[in-house]
Amino acid sequence: MHKFVLSLAAAVLLSGCYSWGDGSDWSDTGSGWQAAGTELADAPLPVKVDHWEQEWATAKQEVADARAEVVAEGRTLPPKIDDDVTELVNREITGPSDAERLQRLQDSVSDARRLAELVSAG
């Protein structure tokens, strides 16, 4: 058990130290991060915000589903990860401008995808 906790702690630490990207090159073709998002890159800002709001809703649901699966299997998450899941699921994304909101949406989607991987692996 101690080995598992250390491995999980190392994964959390490394995920916080490594930049996974800003989300600007995410493609929802199902193949993940790629540079093929040119159709969205040329879109007006409100279209980008709408796209990333949908990505955010999906990513939040993936995290909630991953936690529900852990609970259904009778496992428990480490308190820090469980707190991170709760914070993320309850997070409100706002910004003083569409550009700031877009950046916060992209960052939050990135956070959610990393956290979903940690929860699923854990």
Image: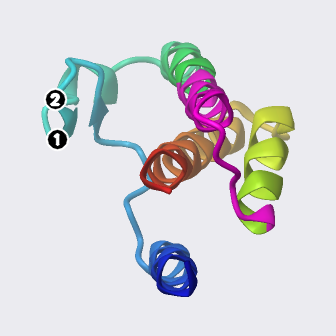
Q: Are dots 2 and 1 in contact, CB under 8 Å? A: yes
Residue 76 vertical position relative to residue 80 in the rendered view, above or below: above
Q: Is residue 113 visible?
A: yes
Q: Position of residue 27 (x, y in %)?
A: 26, 28
Name the residue located 55 percent from the left edge and 51 percent from the top edge: 115
Residue 29 vertical position relative to residue 9 in the rendered view, above or below: above
Q: In this image, 42 relative to 74: left or right? A: left
Residue 12 vertical position relative to residue 62 in the rendered view, above or below: below
In terms of depth relative to the viewer, which is nearer, 49 or 72?
A: 72
Element class at badge 1: loop
Residue wearing tag 1: 34
Please tell me in which quadrant of the rendered image residue 60 appears.
Answer: top right
Name the residue located 50 percent from the left edge and 13 percent from the top edge: 47
Amino acid type of the residue tagged 1 in the rendering: Gln
Amino acid type of the residue tagged 2 in the rendering: Ser
Name the residue located 38 percent from the left edge and 43 percent from the top edge: 24
Residue 112 belongs to magenta span? no
Quadrant of the image containing the N terminus: bottom right
Which span is picked out in magenta? 59-79
Please state the total of marks drawn on the protein image: 2
Name the residue located 45 percent from the left edge and 75 percent from the top edge: 11
Element class at badge 2: loop
Q: In this image, 66 relative to 11: left or right? A: right
Q: In this image, 34 relative to 64: left or right? A: left
Q: Position of residue 76 (x, y in %)?
A: 70, 51
Residue 65 belongs to magenta span? yes
Q: Position of residue 86 (x, y in %)?
A: 83, 43
Residue 33 vertical position relative to residue 80 in the rendered view, above or below: above
Which disc, if any, is residue 31?
A: 2
